[in-house]
Amino acid sequence: MKKPPFKLDHFGGYFSLVVFLFLVVGCQKEAPKVPGCTDPDALNYEVGTNEDDGTCTYERDKFLGEYTNTSYSCIDQQIWQDNEPMEFRISKVPGEPSMVTFVTIYTRAPIDPDLRYNGVVNGNTIEFDYSYSVPGFYIDAHTYVGAIAGLKGTATLTGNEFDFPDARFTVSDADGNLLATFACHLTGTKVE
């Protein structure tokens, strides 16, 4: 008597096939973890890494930090009539590896002490073309609520020396009417 050909149309056949597939899949080895920088936008991206170890570095990183020995000279001293001392720092913009935030810190000025301007890093330069609403801005004995502060220009970092020769600051009221505009030359030394 001749045996019928093997058929998977009964429970035992399907069960055997499922067990066989689980054994094949279960016995495959998982790819070994290769730690390193997994972000292709980073300067030290490593092809073949599959586990981010937090070592990624970006072009913006050279700008990050506090700056001392700061100085500035502005064509219009309307806001800083007493040549107010200013410090600044540059920090990351979360989720944006090519952007930084330039934060100005005034010790005595009657304005928001933390003005923040975002810029885009390109090599050793930061391009600024940014404006945002601030809670209040004091100009000519008047506080403007909902004022808009802006910054345009190109800053350069050479070694630890920061140079921003064409900083163009603007202040507008909430309706967009220009209240003040002034050009400044900012310099500073990055703290290591």
Image: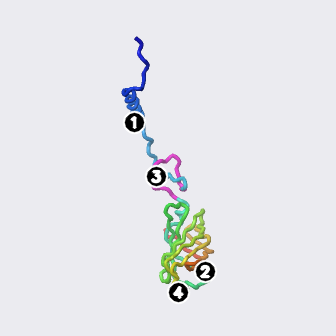
Mark on residue 178?
Answer: 2
Mark 1 packing: few (<14 Cα in 10 Å), some, or many (20+)?
few
Q: Residue at x 52, y 63 (%)?
A: 61
Q: Residue at x 59, y 72 (%)?
A: 163
Neighbor class of circle 2 (other Cα within 10 Å; few <14, some 14-19, many 20+) is few
Can you tell which mark lies on residue 26?
1
The colour scheme is rainbow
Q: Is residue 100 left or right of residue 15?
A: right
Residue that appears at 58% across and 64% down: 121
Q: Does the stretch in magenta take in 126?
A: no
Mark 2 or mark 3: whose residue is earlier in sequence: 3
Of callouts 2 and 1, the N-terminal one: 1
- Give the extent of the magenta segment: 42-57
Q: How many marks?
A: 4
Judge the density around disc 3: few (<14), some (14-19), many (≥20) Cα neighbours within 10 Å.
Answer: some
Nearer to me, 150 or 114: 150
Task: Of the two numbered discs 4 and 2 on the same chain, state the one appearing first in sequence.
Answer: 4
Residue 19 falls in which quadrant of the image?
top left
Which amino acid does the dot numbered 4 rest on? His
What's the distance in space between the residues labelled 2 and 3, CA to CA? Answer: 47 Å
**Up-down: is 173 above or below 190?**
below
Residue at image location 52% in from the left, 82% down from the top: 144
**In the displayed image of the protein, which residue is found farthest to the top?**
1
- Name of the residue lying farthest toward the front: 9
Q: Nearer the viewer, mark 2 or mark 1?
A: 2
Query: Mark 1 against mark 4, which lies toward the viewer?
Result: 4
| Location of mark 3 (residue) | 52
Q: Which mark is residue 142?
A: 4
